[in-house]
Amino acid sequence: MEQQVTNFGRFYSAIKTLNPVGDRDEVKRSIVLQYTDGRTESLREMTRAEYDRCCADLERGTGGREKLRKERSATLHLMQRMGVDTSDWERVNALCRDPRIAGKEFRRIADDEHPGLRARLRAIGRKGGFRGQPGRQELPQPPAGTMTVRVSPVGQA
């Protein structure tokens, strides 16, 4: 039988978040036995469906996926309010790749990094936002000591 799962990062990340009491290998063995109905205690021998179901249940128990979804949503909302086109992933990733922002693509940002990213974005917003954004140009300021009066077209109040 060909090994269906080759990257076990999702499983070990969920286990780490659970912070189990006791030996990590023993906890892993018992979880794998449970999800394979006693067929094996090896992660390598799990089928893709068993592995996905196991990881989904572990993440649901820790709230990992839900927390990440909420953090990403809050960050994207802030970017959108700042004028970043969040429907264009290339723009979002280009912004996040900047070492002063996050230094990596948006999808690679962990849930515990999002609050810091939002703090940096808010600081940028307080300092005037992003330069060179289309549609965000400042109106020219009239010279000091002049007054601007708006005049409506004739026939309108």
Image (tube, helix red, strand yellow):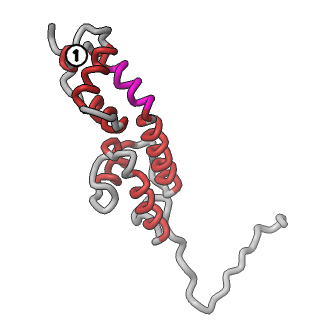
Q: Position of residue 42 (x, y in %)?
A: 20, 18
Q: Quadrant of residue 115?
A: bottom left
Q: Quadrant of the N terminus?
A: top left
Q: Position of residue 76 (x, y in %)?
A: 46, 47
Q: Secondary structure at mark 1?
A: loop
The majority secondary structure of the magenta stretch comes to: helix
Residue at 40% x, 66% y: name it.
Answer: 131
Residue at 33% x, 20% y: name it.
Answer: 52
Please report the bounds of the magenta region as a residue range: 52-61
Residue at 27% x, 55% y: name it.
Answer: 103
Mark 1 = which residue? 41
Alpha-carbon neighbours of circle 1 within 10 Å: few (<14), some, or many (≥20)?
A: some
Q: Position of residue 113 (x, y in %)?
A: 37, 52
Farthest residue to the front: give it. Answer: 22
Q: Quadrant of residue 124?
A: bottom left
In this rendering, position of residue 18 left or right of residue 23: right
